[in-house]
Amino acid sequence: MEDIILRVVGEAGEGVISLGEIIARACARLSYHVLTYRTYPAEIRGGPTMFQVRISPDPVLSQGDGVDILLALNPASLESDGAELRTGGVFLYDAPDANVSQEIKDGARIIHYPLPLTEIATKELNYYLGKNMVALGIMTALFGFPYNLIIELVYQRYPKAEKNLQALEAGFQYGKLHLEKRDQFLLKGRGSKEDRLILTGNEAIALAALAGGCRFFAGYPITPATEIMEWLAQKLPPFGGIVLQMEDELAALAAVLGASFAGKKAMTATSGPGLSLMSELLGLASMAELPVVVVDVQRAGPSTGIPTKTEQSDLNLACLGSHGEAPRIVLAPSTVEECLYYTIQAFNLADIYQTAVILLTDQFLGQRLETIPKPELLSIPRHDRLKYLANGEAKFLRYRLTPTGISPVAFPGEAGGMHVITGLEHNPAGAPDYSPETHQAMMAKRFKKLEPLPQTIEARKAFGDQEAELGIIGWGSSQGAVQEAISQARQAGYRVAALYLKLLYPLPIEQIREFIRSVKKILILEGNYTGQLARFIRSELLINPIQLNICAGRPFSPREVYSKIEDEIMSLHQHM
Amino acid sequence: MTKRSILEYRGEVSPVWCSFCGDYAVLNSLYQVFQRKKLAPEEIVLVSGIGCSSRLPHFVNAYGFHGVHGRTLPTAMGIKLANPQLTVIAVAGDGDGFGIGLGHFIHTARKNPDLKYLVMDNSLYAQTKGQVSPTTCPHRVTPSTPYGVMEEPINPIALAILSGATFVARAYSGKPELLTELLLQAIDHPGFAFIQIISPCVTFNPTDTYRSLTQKSYLVSDYPLEDRVKALELAQAEDRMALGLFYRVRRPTIEEAVREIVEAAQREGPAELAGLVEEFNV
């Protein structure tokens, strides 16, 4: 078995995601690597839902292209999803929906399994909602999943619904007794046992926040970020921390800034609409030099946009949102594993540089399950704020001008450290001061303290060939698709490299410059309409890159990246 | 406890208010209350938003958070929850507290954090030179309502009581002894203590003068302070200048609720990170 893409489609409410997650977890337990991808409507009931698991003995980098095993619980998207089936693929569908077009039937040698899902669920069990579990039972028999493992995972997901186990059993029996296996797919498991975790980007951020010292979270529910708040609400109290759901995002960030002022490591998590509301308070965090971590799990915008679909369109807002010029730090992990690392890093950097750190992920990364090596979370060093020691040497000045621009802090309750922080321009003591000299000096302080940042953290990751013909620059969750496309391109004899930026503000200009110098042509790839990173790079480095933008509510696929690479290298050759 | 001098609480920044601004009385009462309660300056945090009255934290030798317009209460609650030992006092004006930040007033009241919330109410936006505010009376002409105010003012006392505030009072800068007395009681009250302080603007509000306000003011009569119906009845008196404590009840604070949750969660000792990681094992 090499690399299988299994997709479940149906309507919201039919249990597509539950079914898909159980399969993903089963495969992870069987020592496969998995990466999931889901799209679903913003409505609770109705509308097309898709859950896909990519399963491989090797680490999975992206959602991939095409489908090997397709289960349709519902006829709605039979045609479009059916068309993506690869040669030798398997198509399982509810028997009444069997009016699949002749084109799909004949097109690419596909193995069909019309199944009596609704019939078993309704007639045998009188439990229509159990259709997904009937399908799971049948797939368990067909693909050789250990039945006990599936029972355990179903029970974990539905501890109280005995009916689901009955539906599973009915499906399993049907599969064993009535289904003749005509395909080649078997998922019995790999012998090897490695220490691995399976979790989503949102879960990774929540876990790492806790590991990074976060003990105060205030938030407001928003798709697709809510899981971070919900997980922490459960897990922070045993660690002495707390989660508060506030009346809006303004109150959420205000409470977090209050807790930060009082000495806590504090965080909020939101999506684009919430970040828009938080902009004014982000400016305060920058101005008053308050550490805070703000997660933005991006979704398609503008305005309410498409709440459940992925996009990378909040970069401008994250880097520049808020009036005036308010420097902050913006980080963008690309994988679930990087979500862990950069979240801990975010808490460290917030405290070291005393400013807001925005962690930009997106729906694709935030809600996808990935298997990752077990992390050593505690081995990542933790940093706290530089504290003022009341040793009588110098009078405490909260915004003392220092060579690094970083001033020691005191927390309420500490004698000798009394001060007022303010969003007004202020002198080193923190008192309002509008003199030209003060404003100039304090603006410089707030910007200059971030200057060493690109050199002090892992600001980027590079892949591919030295001296490449084409250099791709990207950020965030598209990294896996680009890595796969590059491997394919190298096999085809093209020399391609990629630079994935993890630090988006302040941009690691020198590192980008170095990369640009090492390649012939630059392609900037982003999941937004205008090319927000491209604009920053164009203006900072005076280059004119090619852009590849998609703005369709879905992630990049390796195939489309590869085809762009091919086109661009061809045109380069033609022009030579 | 050591005896403290009132001078200890004077900040290095001098007040920037107009002469005879009602906010001076609030500042002075605060100094006195701090001294009488023997509060250490480092244990006090003053939180404010934007407006004339929101400058107050700068004039006190204590910790202060002079934040964003309207977000005073959630900020103050974040501070209090992060360190419940602190005495956290939120100060605002009627624009900050009843206009841009009104939503937080309701939600903070129902959470009942142990915060003291002083709203210095001059019935207009003074920092921006006299526009209508949420407590301005109908028909009044202001720079932004040259044909007269069109809407009804809000009723902060009634709103506080209905929202779940556990200490609701009205004071007046023209009666500083009563103000100090109410502040002392508010500090002693374990919960969200709201005081609407009628604080005349001598520069932009020619109508609500000390003379007219003093004439309109009277003390609330004695009644059981937990009587919500009576308190609401009084709060709706037409002239709206009854002064004193309207309502006081004891209800668990959000800090107490949080402590309970944390203690219950830690009954078997604090959690370990390694155990959490295990939960994600494949």
Image (cartoon, coloured by chain):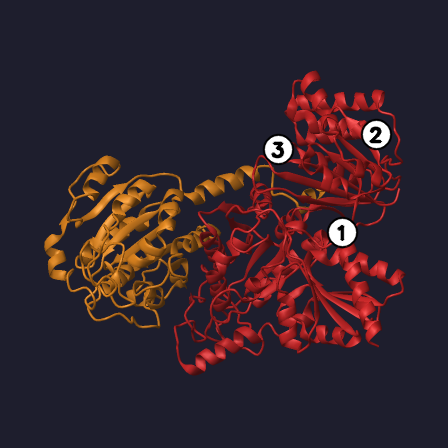
Distance from disc 2 to disc 3, alpha carbons, whole Å, reads 25 Å
Front-lying residue, A533 or A56 = A533
Q: Which residue is mark 2?
A: A142
Label 1, secondary structure: give it.
Answer: loop
Q: Which mark is residue A476?
A: none
Q: Earlier in the sequence, mark 1 or mark 2?
A: 1
Q: Which residue is mark 1?
A: A62
Label 3, secondary structure: give it.
Answer: loop
Callout 2, which amino acid?
Leu
Residue A266, position as x, y percentages in the image: 54, 55
In the image, residue B116 sits, relative to residue A187, either above or below, namely below
Q: Which residue is mark 3?
A: A13
Distance from disc 1 to disc 2, alpha carbons, whole Å, reads 26 Å
Label 2, secondary structure: give it.
Answer: helix
Callout 1, which amino acid?
Ser
Front-lying residue, A430 or B30 = A430
The answer to whether B279 appears left or right of B96 in the picture is: right
Task: Say which of marks 1 and 3 sits in front.
Answer: 3
Question: Numbered disc 1: what chain?
Answer: A
Quadrant (top left, top right, bottom left, bottom right) of the C terminus of chain A:
bottom right
Q: Looking at the image, can residue A358 be seen? A: yes
The answer to whether A254 appears left or right of B157 in the picture is: right
Question: Numbered disc 3: what chain?
Answer: A
